[in-house]
Image (spheres, grey):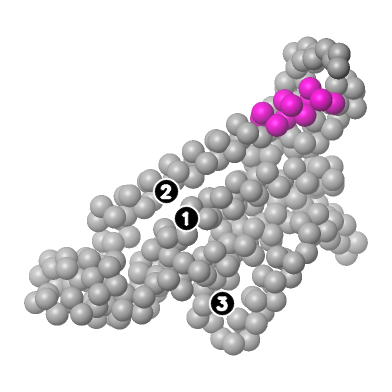
Amino acid sequence: MNYDFDFSFLAAAWPRLLHGALLTIEIAATAIALGFVVGAVCAIARASGTPMLKRVVGAYVETIRNTPLLVQIFLVYFGLATVGFKISAELSAAFALTINVGAYCTEIIRAGISSVARSQIEAAECLGLSRVQTYWHVVLLPAVERVYPSLSSQFVLLMLASSITSQISAEELTAAANLLQSETFRNFEVYIVIAVIYLALSTLFRAAFWAIGQVVFVWATQGTGWRKPVDQARPNGCHRGTESIRQGHAAALDECP
């Protein structure tokens, strides 16, 4: 096979590829942030909401998880336009990806919430924490910490899946590649470059999520973050109650005065 690789087009094409990569990051970051919020709220609703609310959230999760992402993007982009809401392809892409990742985050976070022992909640109640404090400091944050690796992987997959939004003319990285290869006819070289860029983006996202995890969870376990209200709720400066909550042993609270 005689094939001459030619990457000379990169000299003129790199601004377009850079713009596409930045837009990919923007769409993915927006969907990740909003999707995490959607997933957390729905996970709480599915774990401790009313029976009707649980069924509604369950229907949302199963519908999203059992339909193709591309179909969901088409429904958002063309469906909103049909009913009179005309928004850009990029905004439609971010909205569709938010709905999609929110459903997956719901199940991941719900699994984390289910892993929190009842004794931890009882220990928080013994320390005098309110219902909101208990759910935030004792249930939700430890649950997210336990499933954080799964969430991080799901978010990286979302960033890669954003390439599908090129089908609605969102000018992200894959769309830029499609236009570039149609102009240069160097299909192989173009997609080699795009694959390398996506690999770099995946590495960047994983590094960012690792850093976020170190800041949030390591900082928290040092007693200066979300454990502080638990410590303050116990009189006489006793910290064994805090350790009991973290370890799930409510009986150890008897050791505190």
- In the picture, measured across the screen, residue 101 lies left or right of residue 182, that is left
- Give the residues in magenta: 187-197
Q: Dot 1 corresponds to which residue?
A: 148
Front-lying residue, 61 or 88: 61
Q: Secondary structure at mark 2?
A: helix
User: Residue 255: percent from the left, percent from the top?
Assistant: 11, 76
Up/down of 37 relative to 115, above or below: above
How many badges with numbers are in the image? 3
* Secondary structure mainly formed by the magenta segment: helix
User: At 46% from the left edge and 71% from the top edge, which residue is drawn?
Assistant: 113
Which three-letter amino acid code belongs to the residue tagged 3? Arg
The answer to whether one can see residue 203 in this image is yes
Q: Are marks 2 and 1 in contact (CB under 8 Å)?
A: yes
User: At 67% from the left edge and 79% from the top edge, which residue is drawn?
Assistant: 56
- In the picture, measured across the screen, residue 206 lies left or right of residue 88, that is left
Q: Secondary structure at mark 1?
A: helix
Q: Which quadrant is the C terminus positioned in? A: bottom left
User: Residue 33: percent from the left, percent from the top?
Assistant: 57, 53
Q: Dot 2 corresponds to which residue?
A: 213
Which three-letter amino acid code belongs to the residue tagged 1? Tyr
Which three-letter amino acid code belongs to the residue tagged 2? Gly
User: Residue 89: percent from the left, percent from the top?
Assistant: 80, 47
Q: Which quadrant is the N terminus positioned in? A: top right
